[in-house]
Amino acid sequence: MAHEHLEDVKRYLLDLQDRLCDGLAEADGGASFKEESWTREEGGGGRSRVIENGAVFEKGGVNYSHVFGATLPPSATAARPELAGRSFHAVGVSWVLHPENPHVPTSHGNVRFFIAEKEGEAPVWWFGGGFDLTPFYPVMEDVVHWHRVAKAACQPFGDDIYPRYKAWCDDYFYLKHRDETRGVGGLFFDDLNAGGFEQCFAFQRAVGDSFLDAYVPIINRRKNDPWGERERDFQLYRRGRYVEFNLVWDRGTLFGLQSGGRTESILMSLPPLVRWEYGYTPEPGSPEARLTDEFLRPRDWLGVSSPDDA
């Protein structure tokens, strides 16, 4: 089944990259994505697209990659020893958007497909992906909208899908050393192969295709909100948490670096400016305190009685 389905997935992912870049550039209105293609010596390559210093996005990237090889990196075989001795293909699109205005949330997403093969044995394959939202000055209306779109994408695949993958997202994007979530979550799934290839591929497409519907309305609602030095300082401080997660906990970063991926593309997820402050504590009752007090914990966002009920 391997290469026939791999080509189907690649076609979808390349088209998704195009659509994401078109939609995000339109939402920005002041800059466009620049593309750089790259090749991996051991096998594969990709095309990286970056937007910088736009009307909305200080930095953003939408990257497509397809890497393959005769052996898997240690980060993969340590978790899945049954994959030792197999060749592999890993293909995906990953995106991260860092807006300049602190009132517009940062967002991340990816969809990916992995297949490992060994002569004489059935291929091992799965899908993974999801998307999540990291606001600095969260608005309940935006968070509820985000999760409504996520649930709608999951609904055709069963009533249990959104609650399961929402909880998985809360758990995965948890900074254990800070005892807080990275943001307000969304969806996260991995090792998806139950139900057969066609159903799993359809779910991956539903997730990828719903991202712009989830994110662009939030951009449009917040991009003209006024901000100043206080909000900017807090944004840069909270971006530090984003960096901490990606460099300490994120499995995709580790896999990319260990598999010989392109370092510039892998670390594209990091914000352009960030700061750390020793022992910072927001003033009680302030908008900055509201982020950690009310939003950075797992919660049933769709159970909120009103978008304004915080």
Image: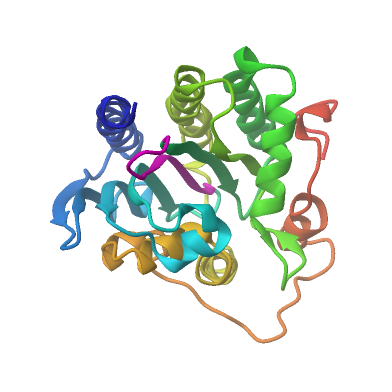
Q: Quadrant of the N terminus?
A: top left
Whether residue 109 appears in magenta in the rendering, the answer is: yes
Question: Mainly helix, strand or loop, the magenta region?
Answer: strand
- In the rendered view, would you say 265 is above or below 163? below
- Quadrant of the image occupied by residue 233: bottom right
**Looking at the image, which residue sits at the far front?**
120
Residue at the image position 15 percent from the left and 63 percent from the top? 41
Horizontal side of residue 8 vs 145, given as left or right: left
Bounds of the magenta span?
A: 104-122
- In the rendered view, would you say 261 is above or below 161? below
Residue at the image position 41 percent from the left and 59 percent from the top? 269
Residue at the image position 73 percent from the left and 41 percent from the top? 167
For the image shown, how many numbered marks are present on the structure?
0
Q: Position of residue 35 (x, y in %)?
A: 16, 48
Q: Nearer the viewer, residue 78 or 97?
A: 78
Q: Check the image and tell me how it is coloured.
A: rainbow
Whether residue 212 appears in magenta in the rendering, the answer is: no
- In the rendered view, would you say 306 is above or below 85? above
Say if residue 227 shows up in the picture.
Answer: no
Q: Position of residue 46 (x, y in %)?
A: 21, 49
Q: Position of residue 195 (x, y in %)?
A: 57, 20
Horizontal side of residue 27 vs 204, given as left or right: left
Q: Position of residue 62 (x, y in %)?
A: 32, 45
Q: Nearer the viewer, residue 144 or 168?
A: 168
Q: Nearer the viewer, residue 298 or 121?
A: 121
